[in-house]
Image (spheres, helix red, strand yellow):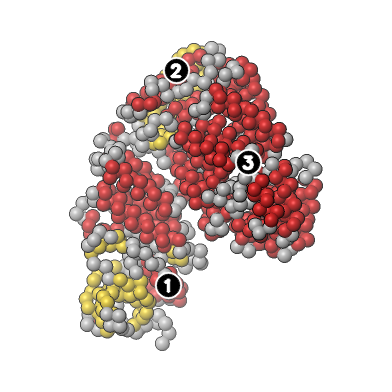
Amino acid sequence: MRLFAPTGLRYNDPEMVGRTVSHYRVLEKLGQGGMGVVYKAEDTRLKRIVALKFLPAEAVAGEEERARFAREAQAAAALDHPNICTVYEIDEAEGRPFIAMACIEGQSLKARLQEGPLRLEQTLDLAAQVAEGLQAAHEKGVVHRDIKSANIMITEKGQAKIMDFGLAQLAGQTRVTRTGSTLGTPAYMSPEQAQGNPVDHRSDLWSLGVVLHEMAAGQLPFKGGSEVAVLHSILYSSPEPLSSLRSGLPLELERIVRKALAKRPAERYQHAADLLVDLRGLAKVFESGSATRAAAPASLVSSIAVLPFANLNRDEENEFFADGITEELISALSKVEQLRVVSRTSAFQFKGQTQDIREIGHRLQVSMALEGSVRRAGARIRVTAQLVSISDGLQIWSERYDRELKDVFEIQDEISLSIVEALKIQLAGGAGPHLVKRHSENLEAYQLYLKGQHHFLRWSHAKALECFQQAIALDPQYASAWAGLAATHGTAAFWGLASRRDSWQQARAAVLRALELDDSLAEAHYTAAYVKAIHETDWVGAERHFRRALDLARGDPGPHYWYATGYLTPMGRLAEAEKELERALELDPLSLMAASSLAWVHFHQKRLDRAIQDCEKILELDPNHVEADMALGCCCVGKQRYQQAEQTFERVRSRMPDNPAALGWLGWCYGGWGKHDLARQMLGRLEEMAVERPVSMCRAWVYMGLDEIDRALDCCEQAYEEGDPFLRYVKASWPYEPLQSEPRFQALLKRMGLQ
């Protein structure tokens, strides 16, 4: 008899009760759904009670369906987690396939919700349990595709069990659903699932977000009179805020649900572990009794984006001034403990766009947005500002300021405090009556500082240096200008834009002066940390400065990013680096720089599949992102997918023909691939470049691919003399493992302070 061949067995025959199927004696019918009928049975061999699920005839009518069932049932059987219903085996009776699984005593979450919404602590507990189960499944490459309240059982002891992984699709294998078809239940479908597009584990996280909303509010977030109407709502509508559906819920729960239900996969939770951290954190706060609750919709606020203020003068000369006001407001509001303020990097991605402010707010995962404009006329300035609610687009507060230019600090302070007042937020005792810090009394020096920042952020280093130096000449006590000067020299040293040794020394002198004038400048501390780490190889001192920056700027993603990349990764503390970068992405959700650094951390850990997923998500958002392409190429080499690696590195070279890192990694690829002639061509090109710039570390990668260890060590030692920042990863990353047993390599680590 051919496996899964259709026969005359009626899967829903009431006469099944009392029959023996394989070695299972059927006791009673438990239920029936679209994917089959379930019976309670006794395993006569092992003397235990099980559940038998028989699939309907149409589910396994063809070869494709039978292949899917076999593959996905095998994947489900490989899952072993307390929050996943255990699958014992798959078998058939008279050609009809069935799954034998644990028999769960309890009720479905759907049945429980018919009694009304759950208590907050129960909502958080069950959601966390489901997230734990999904995390275990996703780590094995299994996507459920049909997470819903009906597929979550609650045992008598309150344990959540995810049911029915029979619809799961093994991630990474060929899709077996036909074009345009969908698997899942409409109200719980992710947007990509509703459109019939390929899905990954993030689709399950969307569905869990729907369940979380359902548990908290007692109703689904997306509704309609027909399946088509529901799918339209999922694709184009935003759910009502939880606070408008049920009073007394924590503001943080609103943010968690909103992030889980982000319509673009790249903007929602990327992994179940990330959602789990937030759920557990909120549960802990709730248990302590300190969770901020929304008393009424009008007082709701958990997060805010300060969008770039428009320059109404429409000239480049004043563009930096409008940007500067925006940045000062971001910095000021970040000091308010009850607000999550989106970072500059994410907020400025919407500069000059005419996109609806509510759509921007949803993409940035905030409940409020501040927008405004700046116009200068001689010594006068007009600033307008308005605070908008993202949920309904209504204006909460607005004001216009017509003042003298010298009053710019007071204007910024008034705007910040007006927002705090409008949102009824109680300032922490240490905040004082002012949020905006006046760094200089000299208005011309302040404008030069803003110009310097403007040029620095656009990689115009020569112009940035000139502006910072002029600001310091006008006000030698201007700590922020000294910090800007230090950061510019440090960046030039790091990327080899000038003499590394001279630039590091200039960065060191400037940052010491900045900290002497004002020890509370977070940006100065992480510049100081880089000087300590790379120029002085003082890693203890580097960590001290990184931690000081973290303490000073808790709402700023920058210190988390720099601590992860500048200290934790070189020291080989990769799990901690991963957490810091995840925190940076939480604060700056659209930061591709932080996302690509996280991909590199996963590469260093040799979690290559995870790193490839990271890179692919980044490249979805920005197909020209060089860091993601480089990491992707290196991952492909690690998986011996040399042709794909070659194509990826060549894609970088097509945009940046003289990128030495691309040449070095491509040479590493050719060496591992056995194409040694091509690898030596890369060496030749790098040796030509060495006349103009230091490329020793890139040459080391090629020699590593060629397995010429002594030559690779020669290049590493030369890179140390050149102050190459790439060298700092030699302790942490797996490609350097062939060098680690060499005494010269161990001696180099000691010279670098890494041993």
The numbered mark, 2 or 3, whose residue comes first in the sequence reads: 2
* Helix, strand or loop at mark 3: loop
Badge number at residue 74: 1
In the rendered image of this protein, does residue 533 appear above or below residue 324?
below
Mark 1: secondary structure: helix
Residue 537 badge: 3
Which residue is disc 2 drawn over? 410
Q: Is mark 2 on a helix, strand or loop?
A: helix
> What amino acid type is highlighted by mark number 3?
Thr
Q: Nearer the viewer, residue 540 or 713?
A: 540
Does the residue at mark 1 contact the one at mark 3 (Cβ under 8 Å)? no
CA gap, disc 2 to disc 3?
43 Å
Mark 2 or 3, which is nearer the eye? 3
Which residue sits at x=55%, y=12%? 378
Lower position in the chain sequence, tag 1 or tag 2: 1
Estimate the x, y position of residue 469 in percent, counting from the top left.
64, 22
Name which residue lies at 34% across and 63% down. 82
Percent x, y of residue 287: 28, 45
Q: In which quarter of the image is residue 656?
A: top right
Inspect this view and state whether residue 222 appears: no
User: Dot 3, crowdedness within 10 Å: few (<14), some or many (≥20)?
Assistant: some
Name the kind of residue labelled 2 in the image: Glu
**Residue 627 placed where, x, y %?**
61, 47
Density class for disc 2 (Cα within 10 Å; few <14, some 14-19, many ≥20) is some
What distance separates the C-alpha of mark 1 from that of mark 2?
Answer: 66 Å
Q: Residue at x 37, y 79 (%)?
A: 91
Question: Does label 1 or label 3 sit earlier along the sequence?
Answer: 1
In the image: residue 672, left or right of residue 481: right
